[in-house]
Image (spheres, helix red, strand yellow):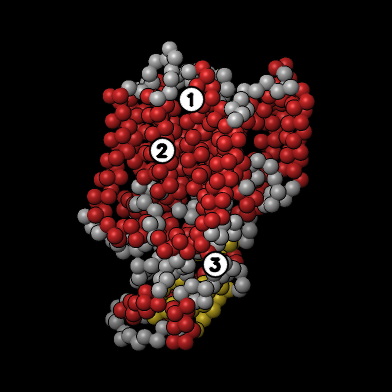
Amino acid sequence: MDQRFPTEQPSYLRQDLFHLGILGVFLLVFVVLTWGQWPLLTADAARELYVPFQIKHGALIYRDFYYLYGPVAPYAWAGLLFVFGEHLNVLYIASALHLAAVCALLYAVARQCLLPRPAVAVVILFFTHFALGRDLNGYLWPYSFAATFAVGWGLLLLLAILRHMLTGHPRWLLLGGLAAGLSCVTKLEFGVAAVSLVAVYFFAAFCLPLRGARPFLRGSEVWLLVLPALLVPGFTLLLLLSQMPLSTVLESTWPTRLMALWNSGGVWTGTPATWRANLTWFFLVVGVLAVLSLGPHILSLALRKPLRGFLGLLLTLGAVTTALGDPNRLGFLLERGHHAWVGSSFLLLAAVFFACLYRLQRDRGGASPELAWALVACYGLLVSARTLFHGLNEYSGYQAPVALIAWVALAVNWLPAALAPARSRRYVFGAMSVLLFALASRHLAGIVDLYQAPRVLVAAPCGRVWSPASIGKPYLATLGYLRQTLLPGEKFVAAPMEPSLYLFAGQDNPVKEDQIFFGYLTTPEEQADFIQRLEVARVRFFVLSNYGSQHKQFGIDYMPELGSWLRSRCQRVAEFGGDEYRLTIYQTPFRFERLSP
């Protein structure tokens, strides 16, 4: 931790460009080989397929359809459809370019604290463990593009603050303020983390005792950071309020009943069942942090030989576990099984943060590597706090990038410095590099196997998706039945989470609910009103999937009145698929006059 900022060494610029070029070529090859295979046709990813087209067709977010996140990501994608045409290839290209930008930002942030090769290791681990995953938890087509956009804004803010602290150029403050403001209107928890990081930067600039150091933030420059962070969300809110009341916005982005049901019902595996369990975990983390604060020398302690040997043995056991264990259930540090790495990442970042604060208080240094690490660790803690409080789940990979920087630094910098004398540190560095390479290779092999599963092509004028056969075959059969049977003017509704059917069937969603899932339509009155709206919208078919039935069953565990109406008043006319994925088509009891084409 006594190294200087690596970016102060201009001789590395050519090497940085070379590394980014190699990573870009790797991403390009992967994108070409897996083109059209990223989206999942059901669940949250299906919403991300349809929403940009819905906006392009004139629908207004929050007013005409529910959306849990900020408007930046869906309107950015809809804008591309306006400019380049309504085709999925437009979104595929945009998604790949966006991932490339996130990787470049992650490399740039890592380079503020690491040398070029460790910074490349950070991006490689990000690629293999998180970015290239398929379906909900990947970055090429995630459960929500709001999450990947927010990751990018957060990295941009962190980079801007670190660069301003180093160079003093005001333009970095302006860029950071813009990134903070965009975070606030992209995904709420990332916006809170961004605003909190800005506050921490102000505290570091004006409240930390800096002995003989130049001020890296002047009072007159504060507004360059604050104004964009306020104006972007303020202007966005004014635009929304000119089209709808505030209650409509809050009902969509802050659905209190939905959140209460999810947090009390244990919908997702690993989510604490009650708020009492959440608070218990929260205070446990606080207690561990209090213990860590008593030993702030953790990253700069000169360890004695017995302790070096003990830590080396633990590290060896961890490497063996990684090599031999089931990657879905066992592992060490960076394994993704049940995302247990998030808790250990939180503690590692906390250790870095407290150690850096201790050294800053002791040395009273200004814009130093310790302060840079403190800011990096602080932001990592802020973005991971939400996952720790909500429970570990498949969405925690979007809190990963900053934590990876600390893990790589631990492997290639801090552990070699603590475990080995200076003359043998290169060997420890080499061993840790091999371990990181093995981790990356192992997960990359798993991703390749995932993409080699049998697939079927789902095509329409809007584009193509190569779907896993278990989902694609019943999906195609359902599309064929709807296309052949629906008369002009008649509609269908898909539930609980299949809005992509509207896109491939060439129909706009006839109701406001894109997702008819657990937490929506919770009262009998709401369900009765929904049935009436089906008749007004000329809905002939109700398409029901078995998605999520292992957690909550539609019509029984939630929306029982709607389920009872479906079973007693509607006629089941077709069913496709099996236990893994099944689509059942019900014909409603409504009778409509045939409309002329």
* Circles 3 and 1 in contact, beta carbons < 8 Å: no
- Give the alpha-carbon distance from disc 2 to disc 1, as whole Å: 16 Å
Label 2: few (<14), some (14–19) or many (≥20) C-alpha neighbours in 10 Å = some
Residue at image position (48%, 26%) is 372
Q: Comparing marks 3 and 2, which lies closer to the viewer?
A: 2
Task: Indicate whether 56 appears above or below 300.
Answer: below
Q: Position of residue 326 (x, y in %)?
A: 72, 50
The answer, for residue 55, to whether it is visible in the render is no
Which disc number belongs to residue 342?
none
Q: Amino acid at mark 3?
A: Gly
Label 3: few (<14), some (14–19) or many (≥20) C-alpha neighbours in 10 Å = some
Nearer to me, 95 or 90:
95
Which disc number belongs to residue 548?
3
Nearer to me, 35 or 332:
332
Q: Secondary structure at mark 1?
A: helix
- Give the alpha-carbon distance from disc 3 to disc 2, as whole Å: 35 Å
Which disc number belongs to residue 196?
2
Q: Position of residue 107 (x, y in %)?
A: 51, 32
Decide if residue 441 is on the left or right side of residue 179: right
Q: Position of residue 239 (x, y in %)?
A: 24, 51
- Circle 1 residue: 371
Q: Amino acid at mark 2?
A: Ser
Residue at image position (73%, 34%) is 315
- Give the alpha-carbon distance from disc 3 to disc 1, as whole Å: 45 Å
Going from N to C along the chain, the mark reached first, 3 or 1, is 1
